Image (cartoon, rainbow, N blue to C red):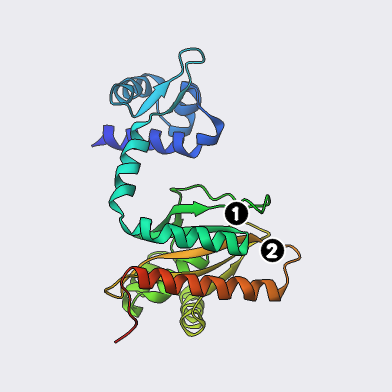
């Protein structure tokens, strides 16, 4: 079990530094807080399983392609993605902003799809696969607002203090009333996000569609347009997944 936990720690460190291409064994040792001798043994086993790769010239380590293969297999089992993606692409074209699809995963959500607008060079880069605590951001609050009060409270009690709970519950109430969530600078200063939840045929929330944008010099009229287009997209996506409204 300890070996598995250490291997996953190494993989997560390499994933977090994916944009930096690769890491040396000494950098990994520091970031993973593991002795070089122990780390070397684990790295050898991970290479054998295709979990990581070592550059022959630099001797640096990077994630292996097995993660992509497994991820794509899981992605392929999510048959609703094929129904949702055309709507996300249409929304990104209409609003000329980046559009995201988030999926709940325990106390977090995971960004499982991102469509960037080719017409807008200024974009927010949120990496696919990152986990975001459920109480942070418009997408997550839209998801919480679509859960039962008992379910959302059970999640929030594990993430925030009692003092913060009342404010969050008030926010969720407002989201239910207006039909969308909006946040400003909760994760990245100078950015905003608008989100709506997505429901399936059983009326269960399966995720959220959101628009992320740089909020410098953005007019309220433009925000209202984003909200209108997003709410319409959320409604169409839910209909495609079998949702027919509350009985």
In the drawing, what numbered circle is on residue 117? 1
Quarter of the image with the N terminus in it:
top left
Q: Position of residue 214 (x, y in %)?
A: 67, 59
Q: At numbered mark 2, what does the secondary structure look like: helix, strand or loop?
A: loop
Q: Where is residue 111 in the image (x, y as percent from the top left)?
A: 45, 54
User: In 3D space, how far apart are the residues under numbered discs 1 and 2 (Cα atoms)?
Assistant: 16 Å
Label 1: few (<14), some (14–19) or many (≥20) C-alpha neighbours in 10 Å: many
Quadrant hosting residue 239? bottom left
Q: Where is residue 199 in the image (x, y as percent from the top left)?
A: 36, 71
- Residue drawn 51% across the image and 47% down it: 127
Q: Which residue lies furthest to the left in this view?
A: 1
Residue matched to label 2:
215
Q: Is residue 149 above or below residue 18?
A: below
Q: At numbered mark 1, what does the secondary structure look like: helix, strand or loop?
A: loop
Q: In this view, does 76 lie above or below 182?
A: above
Quarter of the image with the C terminus in it:
bottom left
Please indicate whether residue 7 sits to the left or right of residue 197 in the image.
left
């Amino acid at each position: 079990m300890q070996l598995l936990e250490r291997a996953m720690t190494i993989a997560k460190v390499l994933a977090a530094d994916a944009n930096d291409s690769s890491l040396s064994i000494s950098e990994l040792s520091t970031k993973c807080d593991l002795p070089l001798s122990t780390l070397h043994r684990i790295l050898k086993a991970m290479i054998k399983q295709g979990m990581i790769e070592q550059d022959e010239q630099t001797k640096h380590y990077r994630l292996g392609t097995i993660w992509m293969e497994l991820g794509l297999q899981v992605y392929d089992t999510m048959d609703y993605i094929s129904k949702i993606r055309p709507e996300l692409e249409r929304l990104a074209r209409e609003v000329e902003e980046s559009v995201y699809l988030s999926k709940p995963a325990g106390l977090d959500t995971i960004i499982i799809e991102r469509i960037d607008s080719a017409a807008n060079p200024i974009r927010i880069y949120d990496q696919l696969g990152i986990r975001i605590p459920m109480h942070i951001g418009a997408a997550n609050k839209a998801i919480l607002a679509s859960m039962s009060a008992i379910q959302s409270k059970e999640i929030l009690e594990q993430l925030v203090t009692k003092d913060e709970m009342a404010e969050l519950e008030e926010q969720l109430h407002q989201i239910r009333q207006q039909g969308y969530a909006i946040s400003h600078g909760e994760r990245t200063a100078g950015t905003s996000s608008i989100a709506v939840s997505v429901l399936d045929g059983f009326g269960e929330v399966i995720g959220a569609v959101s628009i992320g944008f740089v909020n410098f010099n953005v007019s309220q009229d433009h925000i209202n347009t984003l909200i209108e287009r997003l709410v319409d997209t959320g409604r169409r996506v839910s209909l495609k997944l079998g949702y027919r409204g509350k009985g």
